[in-house]
Structure formats: C-alpha cells, structure tokens
Amino acid sequence: MNQDNIVKVILKKNLKNQDVLEFNFFKIQHIILTSENANNLKNFFEILLLELSKKPFILELVIEKDYETVLYKDVAMAYIDSLNDEIIELIDSEEWKEVFKSN
C-alpha cells in the first residue's frame, strides 16, 4: 500500500500517564490499554470500520521515543499485527470490494 493508505498508530503515555494507542484517523482516536470499559473498544471498532469503508488502509505502529513499558510494547505489536491481518482479509473480500467501488 502507498503512504496515503497507512494509518499511524502511536503507543504512548497520555497526559494522565495512561498507556494508550493513538490512531491517527481523520479524527484521532485513543484506546486506553488499561481501561476495562468494553464500550470504548466497541466504539473504536465502529470508527475503524467507518474509516475503512472510506478507503482501504493498513496500520503502522510507532512507539513513542520515551515509552518504556515493555509488556505494552509487545501487546501493541501483536494487536496491530492481528488488526492488519483482519483488515487485509476484509478489504480482499468481495463484499468490501463493492464498498470501495461505491466510494
């Protein structure tokens, strides 16, 4: 995919010192890695699918320079890899090819 089809995802600490994944869609979205609120994850997936319906993309993880929590680094790498696998499978499906044609 070309550069326009890559969404940067930054692993970092937010201002409240929480570990977050920051997805740089048109409107930036955050997943707080220590949150137990399942609705936040559900809302994120809705936004992910909406963004994906506009144009195909893959995710690229960027770990903030001063980020130190090794466990979350490993989790974030595995999570983004899994999401990318799912995204590729989805955009290669016949149903989504129709969605991209109509946009």
Image (cartoon, rainbow, N blue to C red):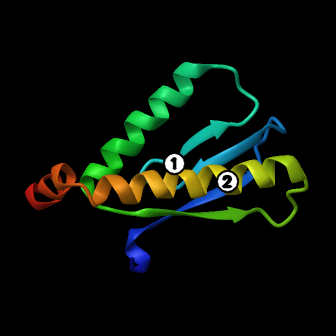
Q: Residue 88 in the image: x percent, y percent?
A: 39, 60
Q: Does 52 appear above or below 47? A: below
Indicate the quadrant containing the N terminus: top left, top right, bottom left or bottom right: bottom left
Question: Which residue is pictured at 8% across the width and 55% down the height?
Answer: 102
Quarter of the figure with residue 5 = bottom left
Q: CA distance from mark 2 to mark 1?
A: 21 Å
Q: Residue 13 in the image: x percent, y percent?
A: 79, 47
Which residue matches tag 2?
78
For the view shown, which residue lies furthest in the left direction? 102
Quarter of the figure with residue 35 = top right
Question: Which residue is pictured at 72% across the width and 36% down the height?
Answer: 33
| Mark with earlier residue (2, 1) | 1
Rendered image: mark on residue 53: none
Q: Does 18 appear above or below 95? A: above
Q: Residue 66 in the image: x percent, y percent?
A: 88, 62
The reply, left or right, for residue 67 in relation to residue 60 is right
Q: Secondary structure at mark 2?
A: helix
The reply, left or right, for residue 7 in relation to residue 46 is right
Question: Which residue is pictured at 28% across the width and 61% down the height?
Answer: 92
Q: Nearer the viewer, mark 2 or mark 1?
A: 2
Q: What amino acid is labelled 2 in the image?
A: Ala
Q: What amino acid is labelled 1 in the image?
A: Ile
**27 and 60: which is toward the camera:** 60
Crowding at mark 2 (Cα within 10 Å: few <14, some 14-19, many 20+)? few
Q: Secondary structure at mark 1?
A: loop
Q: Residue 59 in the image: x percent, y percent?
A: 51, 61
Which residue matches tag 1?
28
The reply, left or right, for residue 79 in relation to residue 49 is right
